[in-house]
Image (spheres, helix red, strand yellow):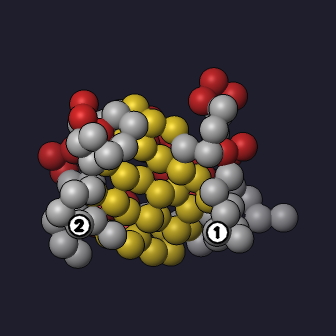
Amino acid sequence: MKNGLITSRAGFDLDALAALDNVMSIDDLSDRQIQRARVIFKNGYGLSIIRGPGLTFGGIEGLFEIAPFDAEGQIDGSLFDEEDEGGRVLGYCDVEKVQHYLIKIGSIKND
């Protein structure tokens, strides 16, 4: 995997995340302008994580923007916690907030 979105300098790394039992795949879609990853869990849900100075909400401060998606691959803002609701994406996320949603989205049980 190329040295992209979430490396140990940001507080956690994609390789460690990939070792978790509930992660199906991690796509590093980073380019020169934006760091971008899509984490897909075995439950079919996922989380898009992006960061880019001037291109994402909070990117200029080094923070992340995230978007959860449902088992059909559609962005679903209803998966955010009540205090974070209000849109399809959530900006200005620190590493702890991203980790919270990685755990939350990965733990959703399929019906």
Q: Are marks 1 and 2 in contact (CB under 8 Å)?
A: no
- Disc 1 element: loop
Mark identifier at residue 57:
none
Residue at (56% x, 62% y) in the render:
46
Mark identifier at residue 73:
1
Residue at (45% x, 75% y) in the render:
25
The correct choice, above or below, for 16 with respect to 67 in the image is below
Question: Does the image show residue 93?
Answer: no
- Disc 2 element: loop
What kind of residue is marked 2?
Answer: Asp
For the residue carrying disc 1, how many other residues have a C-alpha within 10 Å: few (<14), some (14-19), or many (20+)? few
**In which quadrant of the rendered view does residue 73 lie?**
bottom right
Q: Which one is closest to the eye, mark 1 or mark 2?
A: 2
Closer to us: 56 or 93: 56
**In which quadrant of the rendered view does residue 42 lie?**
bottom right
Mark identifier at residue 31:
2
Could you tell me residue 107's position as x and y percent? 62, 54
86 sits to left or right of 1? right
Q: Quadrant of the C terminus?
A: bottom right
Could you tell me residue 38's position as x and y percent? 44, 65
For the residues marked 1 and 2, what is the alpha-carbon distance in whole angstroms?
A: 22 Å
